[in-house]
Amino acid sequence: MQIAKTEINKNVNANVEFKDIDISLFRHFPRLAVALEALQVTGKDVFSKDTLIAAKQIDVALNLMSLFGGDQMKIYSITIDEPRIHAIVNKDGKANWDITIPDTATTATPEAESSFNIQLKKYAIKDGYISYIDIPGDMSSEIFHLDHSGSGDFTADLFTLKTTTSAESVSFTYTKIPYLINAKATLDADIAVDNRNDKYTFKTDDIALNDLKLSAEGYFQFVNDTTYGMDIKFNAPSTEFKTLLSLVPAIYKNDFAKIKTSGKAIFNGFVKGEYNAVKMPAYNINLNIEDGFFQYPDLPQPVKNITIALKVDNPDGITDNTVVDLSKGHIEFGNDPFDFKLLLKKPVTDQYIDAWIKGKLNLAQVTQFVKLSGDTKLSGLLDADAMAKGNVAVITQQKPGPFSANGFINITNLNYSSGDFPQPVRNSNIQVKFDNPDGVADHTVIHVPAAHIEIGSDPIDFNVLIKNPATTLSFDGSAKGKFNLANAAQFTSFEPGTTLSGLLSANIAFKGNKTDIDKEAYDKINLSGMLNVADMQYASKDYPTGINISNAAFTFNPKNITLNSLKAQYLKSHITASGAIDNAIGYALKDEPVAGSLQVHADKLNLNDFMGTETAATATDSAAGTGTSSSEPFTVPKNVAFTLQAAIDELTYDKTSYHNLKGSVVIKDETVSLQNLQMDALDGKIGLNGSYATKTDKKNPAISLTYDVKELNVEKTFYAFNTVQQLMPIGKFISGVISSQLTLNGKLGSDMSPVLSTLTGKGNLLLLEGVLKKFAPLEKVAQTLNVAELNGLTLKDIKTYFEFANGKVLVQPFHVKVKDIDMEIGGMHGLDQSINYAIGMKLPRSLIGTQGNALINNLAQQASSKGIPVKLSDYINLNIKMGGTISNPQIKTDLTEAAGDAVADMKQQAADFAQQKIDSAKKTLQDSAKSIKDEVVKDLKEEVAKQLLGGKKDSADSGKPLEDTRKNAEEAVKNTLKDLLKKKPAKDTARKE
């Protein structure tokens, strides 16, 4: 099963998971049944949180002989049980079902014959759910309890596919207009399939939406992978008004069969053309109702004289050429007439309307005409007499053109409650006035003088006055009230598992104009007041343990938003905060730079919990080696400039606890900087500064770190940090106390861990006191020389200087004297644990054992035989070279007179190390130059395209792509030269030479 998962995931750009594979000889006997249990397919990258399909089971019938071998597996039938399909086209036009991996082959290769032979005879979908959301097309659909089956000879080029389809509920919305709402649907059709041209032609009279019967004919064709062609006509054969009335959900679900109706209706239309990410087909819908009438037999009043003349026409598939013409609308509730009309043209650009509404309706009397669901209660008065004519874009976009509006819409004493609204809407009054005295668009006034709404026991009052909509669009208003956040579920749908509660209270006044907003003069927008949140609790699948805000108090003024106080709890952390935010309006409206400062205190903070863990599915994939992880480093926002003064009593990261942490975190220029952070940890004190930047590289963020640590426990420090384990592997064998300074630069990988090969830096380390034991290289020296005193060294005040680059750490020569043994030590080790060290040792002969003395005498004889005079005395001068690895060292020992001074070897190593740094810096500059060149070419192409195509500059854009690229180039070059030209540290005057 794991092999199957791995192979599937290799061949699709998605994460595929299933619980089991079920094989049966009996379920489809005499054919072999193979089923995938609990299939789930989730997307990657932008769709990483979206499930494309989840199915209880996908059952396939194969030829039985495929169980025992053979070249091909013949598939006869496919059944999908309880699929849940979520099809999405995001704002960039990318579809989440496009999960095929592109063929990167540059030359055509003969296509191997597939081991699967599709001899499909039938297929079925049982109890399915389909959600379709097309953001660019402003279209959505939802289907519940879908049953669909088809049968035919799929091996033939031309055949008839017999299909049967039913769904308990179908909804469809286009350009915010709901064309279908929870309609019960059936469709039976014989479809002529042309496999050679991917074309499906049909003609059927067996389509039903609730009681509305439809006839349809035409074709649907797959033009290519992204384009669909169609030419479909539909018509309602019946002219009875009742069939159309069945599409009104509130009427259809309450004793619809008993309703008395009369009247005539016509309903037809077509859709013709091609559909893809940038194109829509042409379409037309005609609806006419004359003398419509319906009455429930047990209700006293009818709804009568219903007249509707509606035509929706789009001649070429261009959305802006759509015309919605509701030329006549009339309905009488008892003796109360209601009249309306609407003409809509150019819905994308000018947004021209010619609309009118007039009538009165006592909502308390609606129950005399229509049966409301069980516990629904409704009362109040709707009174409207209003018109609007002209281009709505005059108001929304300040485009020149005609517009005027006059009249009013009043809702008085509205009360509404139902099972979906456990907290009723009560005592609500809203009046909207429209006034235009002379037909000049800019003289239109829209006024809501005093509106009052109560939701449960929470009152909300607001007013707003809008003037000069064609030029400056000035506004002046206020809002005051409170709202129980638990009631938000009555007005919006949350994701499963999401809960929200708490109390929101506000008293806000606002005054300004849209011209100042467009000019980014937000200081001229007069925003004042307060907003408080109390006892807020929020939980979701992303925050399963919940966020609790016991209190948050904000005040508003034209300059900024002030957070007076915040008390919150998250993941066992108690957090308090205060501060101010500047330009919040610009950031919210146009993604402009936002700045501010916050003071934050937490009693304890466990970063392991904050960073979270991988989901079980991801962990399974990782263990299987499928490589489905889509984690990416945190990207620092480019329009944020924030200073955070932090104080944390106890911070936990990995297995280490830090206490009394204080310092500043500055977010600016796509960089997070740590400034003067101080903390107690690892039995000592740590001070550090650093940065994390994603400005030039989002996938491999640049990091820099400078620390100054005092009196840390060596063993605890070694096991606390992976980087220390690589840079200072000897720490594993030392028990003691160290102080150190370090400057480091490098890159992080996608898992936010340092890319060790990119790390460069330098520092020093002072071992105040400690014991070195079980260090294999030193033990090997002790064994070779037969000096027991070298097996365990007690060290004190040993200071070393080091630097690192290209995966190597250079330790400059330092002096150690232990039990009359003088040593000058220096060299290099690799992050791969390789070692290359030299030791100049002055060793008392009295400490050397018998085996060691024999070695010394042998070395002296070898030197003499080569003509090198050696005089052995009470002290022996040795040149010891260490190679191999820390765990498997290789030791070479010789007399200084024969092998030369060990210090000279160390100097040569330092020179080689410096040259490698220069070579590496040159390569970095070359790579940066190529990257800069590519970026400049890209920006030039985009700029030229904009100029040639007459594209307008985005007001939210800096408008200087080449300038931004230049700055990034300067930053990259400066950073490289900075690393290359770092000054070498001054010698420690206290160090013995």
Image (cartoon, rainbow, N blue to C red):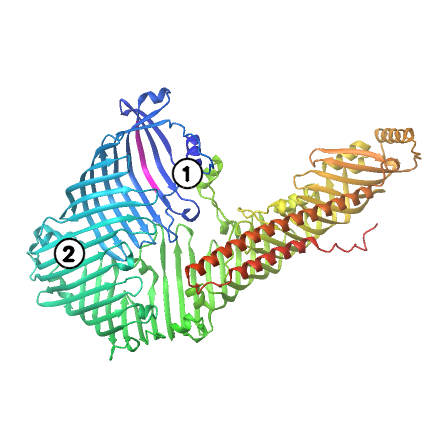
- At x 72%, y 51%, the residue is 764
* The N terminus: image quadrant: top left
Residue marked by disc 1: 12
Query: In the image, what residue type sits under mark 2?
Result: Leu
Locate residue 950 relative to residue 388 in the image: left or right.
Answer: right
Locate residue 601 relative to residue 816 in the image: left or right.
Answer: left
Locate residue 817 relative to residue 208 in the image: left or right.
Answer: right
Count of marks overlaid on the render? 2
Q: Which x, y percent locates residue 93?
A: 37, 51
Q: Is residue 54 magenta?
A: yes
Residue marked by disc 2: 287
Regarding residue 850, the answer to whether it shows in the image is: yes
Q: Which residues are magenta?
A: 53-61
Regarding residue 490, the answer to whether it shows in the image is: no
Pointer 2 and pointer 1: residues touching (CB < 8 Å)?
Answer: no
Secondary structure of the magenta portion, mostly?
strand
Q: Nearer the observer, disc 2 or disc 1?
A: 2
In 3D space, how far apart are the residues under numbered discs 2 and 1 (Cα atoms)?
45 Å
Q: Residue furthest bottom?
A: 437
Q: Which x, y percent locates residue 793?
A: 77, 41
